[in-house]
Image (cartoon, helix red, strand yellow):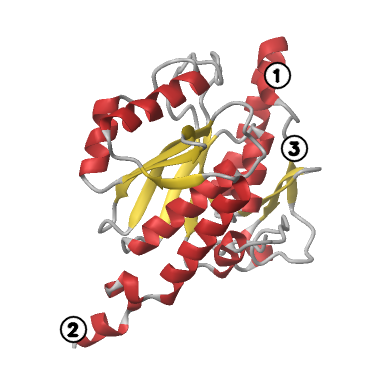
Amino acid sequence: MNDALADADPRADPLADPLVEQAGRDARTAADAAHVVVREVSGLGELAAVGDLFTRIWGRPSVSTELLRAFSKTQSYVGGAFRDGALVGACVAFHAAPRLRSLHSHIAGVTPGTGGRGVGFALKVHQRAWALRHGVDEIAWTYDPLVARNAHFNVVKLAARPTEYLTNFYGPMADAINGDEDTDRLLVRWDLRAPAVIRAAAPGAAWRSVPGGSDGVPPDAVVPVPPDIERLRATDPAAAHDWRLRVRESLAPHLAAGAAVGYDRERGYLVHVPARTGAASTTGDV
């Protein structure tokens, strides 16, 4: 009986799953649109280039060549985006519990100056295709909830679902991006088979910022974020810290209570409490 059930599940043979084939096509289309080639990285020279890329972005070493080599050898994900043969973006993820059916995407970045040109999207869609091909159903990662462009990218463009607020998750980092600020993070989960995610990965996706189960329902709370927290950290660290505390105090209890959280560029985070959405655990249409 168990064997029959396994045979009936396309994920038992990922390459036989039509969603895997579609995800591969979506990844190639996204890469073409960004004018890059996205592929796995495994050679020592290219792995070192990935580490160097992250160092340029964050202003300090973030991940060593040795660790990247170990990730690659153990069939975790190390992907790179190349334009005219030069590395312009990279993304690293490792397998996570339960049962190696999920990935934790630890770090991703693109060369300064290439942001907004689709390179980050091409990397994530490639990561999704790779994951599905390896029998992985979900990818999780964290991001700074104060960075407005990342909130839009993760929650709206990718249709990832915020699930947990992590206070000062990494501790002091003192790098070029985080400065001396507390490293609060939002944990998001990307259900690779969810209809909203399938639509988000498809070419020409139309993005809407309504969280699941709340279509047409006004949010119970709106949590604004500053338009450019990185500039604010450089010009007014005290004001940046006030934003950190304000967003933490607003978002953390809502997520702990199971609220569905979306994002809107004009207003900020849109919170729908479970009693009103009736489906706080679903991913929103984007």
To which residue does mark 3 refer? 224
- Say whether marks 1 and 2 touch (CB < 8 Å): no
- The percent coordinates of residue 23 (x first, y second) are 48, 64
To which residue does mark 2 refer? 3
Q: How many other residues sit within 10 Å of disc 1, few (<14), some (14-19) or many (≥20)?
A: few
The answer for how far apart the CA atoms under marks 2 and 3 are is: 51 Å
Q: Quadrant of the C terminus?
A: bottom right
Left or right of 47 in this view: 147: right
Amino acid residing under circle 1: Arg
Residue at left offset 45%, top offset 72%:
19
To which residue does mark 1 refer? 231
Residue at left offset 51%, top offset 54%:
125
Q: Secondary structure at mark 1?
A: helix
Q: Which quadrant of the structure image shows residue 41?
A: top left
Dot 2 or dot 3, earlier in sequence: 2
Which residue is more in the foreground, 154 or 30? 30
Which residue is more in the foreground, 281 or 130? 130
The answer for how far apart the CA atoms under marks 3 and 1 are is: 17 Å
Amino acid residing under circle 3: Pro
Q: Quadrant of the N terminus?
A: bottom left
Residue at left offset 42%, top offset 26%:
170
